Amino acid sequence: MIAARYIARNSAIAARLVGGEMMIMSATDSTFFTLNDVATVIWQAADGRTPLSEIVTAKICQEFDVCPEEAERDAEQFVNELSQHGILRVSELPIGSSSPAPPERP
Amino acid sequence: MTATSQTVQLDPLAIEIGGTPIAIRTESLAFRELLASRYAGFVRACPNPELELAIELFEPVEPAQADEDLQVRLQGEEWCIERGDFRARWNPAAARGRVRQSANPYAIDSVLRIIHTLILARQGGFLIHAASAIRGGRAFLFAGVSGAGKSTISRFAPPDVQLLTDEISYVVRSNDGYKACGTPFAGELARVGENRSAPLSTLFLLEKGPENRIGPVGESEALRSLMRNILFFAEDAGLVSQVFESACKFVNQVPVRKLIFVPDERVWDIIGQQARE
């Protein structure tokens, strides 16, 4: 049985939704990311309590025209990359405290 | 015969950039003169400096490596700033620091840039890899990577333009927006900028092309481009977040445009139109 993976936003980041694009800066290594639409949905759903697989099936596959296998593969890749830069925390257990979703610009 | 060393007490040399003077204290008359010459136009009398940097010179056994990785990290109360050719400490609370370096001006140049980025980050400003100039009482920034045209734009500036820098621009928050200030940090032109400032009108993203025209830039592209060009070195989560927030505020307030230009003096015609609008 494959263990569930939980993802949570790290607090050591700065993020803003600008012009419809989610922009994230790692405060630890100053790496700057612009997320695409799918990655933005994953980012916003990364509350530490919802398994990644559930985010993929309940949100990605519902909102985008993509099959579950492909969506899960892309999501894993995205999560791995952001976790390497300390932007997402990943755990096989639910993660207690996640920073709130970044505010949208007025 | 006895070797003696002579300690010389020299007045500090205040180098004022962006309205922030930093007094440089050195016991070497030759190095003081070198700094006075290099930063001419930015040196001013400052009997009671708020910010002070003491320089200790040493003779390197081997040639110093200026291209070694720069490290800027907070240790307790002090910023530790280190590169192959210098070691510096900066205490922001005490507004005092010290630098140990050989007698080359590049090390102190880098230390000054870094200290200014740390000061500016707390105030919502930043240093940016951009040329800047004043025309018609308003300042314009011209940002781009090496080869984008910063020096070209600067070189073709007509006589009524005051060049603030051809390489590193100084942006500070003011009451009703931002202003750009001159810096002594020169690029290809090897010409120190003018020590003056003006309200910031527009940030132009440079792009060489077949014609001169100004084009729109989306908000997200503006922020991406700005972040690519802001100079910031500190490995500190709080300050990095502040710089990001400052960049977001900047693109919200200051028009960001693409400046597509043919590399000759005619580009200043459309910048002149922009200055008059």
Image (cartoon, coloured by chain):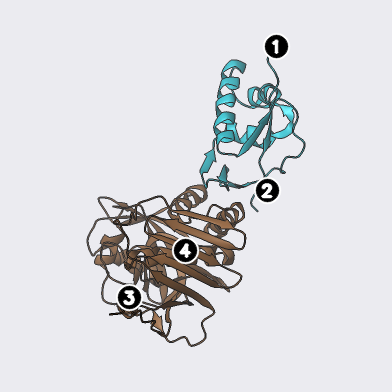
Chain colours: A cyan, B brown
Outermost residue toward the left in this view = B264
Q: Amino acid at mark 4?
A: Ala
Whether residues under marks 1 and 3 lie with C-beta atoms below 8 angstroms apart, the answer is no
Residue A78 lies in quadrant: top right
Q: Is residue B227 above or below residue A39?
A: below
Q: Which residue type does callout 3 highlight? A: Phe
Q: Nearer the viewer, mark 2 or mark 3?
A: 3
Element assignment for label 2 = loop
Q: Residue at x 50, y 62 (%)?
A: B254
Chain where mark 3 sits: B
Density class for disc 2 (Cα within 10 Å; few <14, some 14-19, many ≥20) is few
Q: Residue A1, labelled with which disc?
A: 1
Depth order, front residue of A91/B229: A91
Label 2 to label 3: alpha-carbon separation: 51 Å
Could you tell whether B177 is left or right of B216 in the image?
right
Whether label 2 touches label 1, CB < 8 Å: no
Residue topped by disc 4: B88
Dot 2 and dot 3 within a common chain = no
In the rendering, which numbered label is found on residue B31?
3
Which residue extends farthest top? A1
Q: Viewed as shown, does residue A72 lie left or right of B147?
A: right
Q: Residue B277, can we see it?
A: no
Labelled pair 3, 4 in contact (Cβ < 8 Å):
no
Whether labels 4 and 2 belong to a single chain: the reply is no
CA separation, marks 1 and 4?
54 Å
Q: Secondary structure at mark 4?
A: strand
Image spot of residue B133 (x, y percent): 36, 70
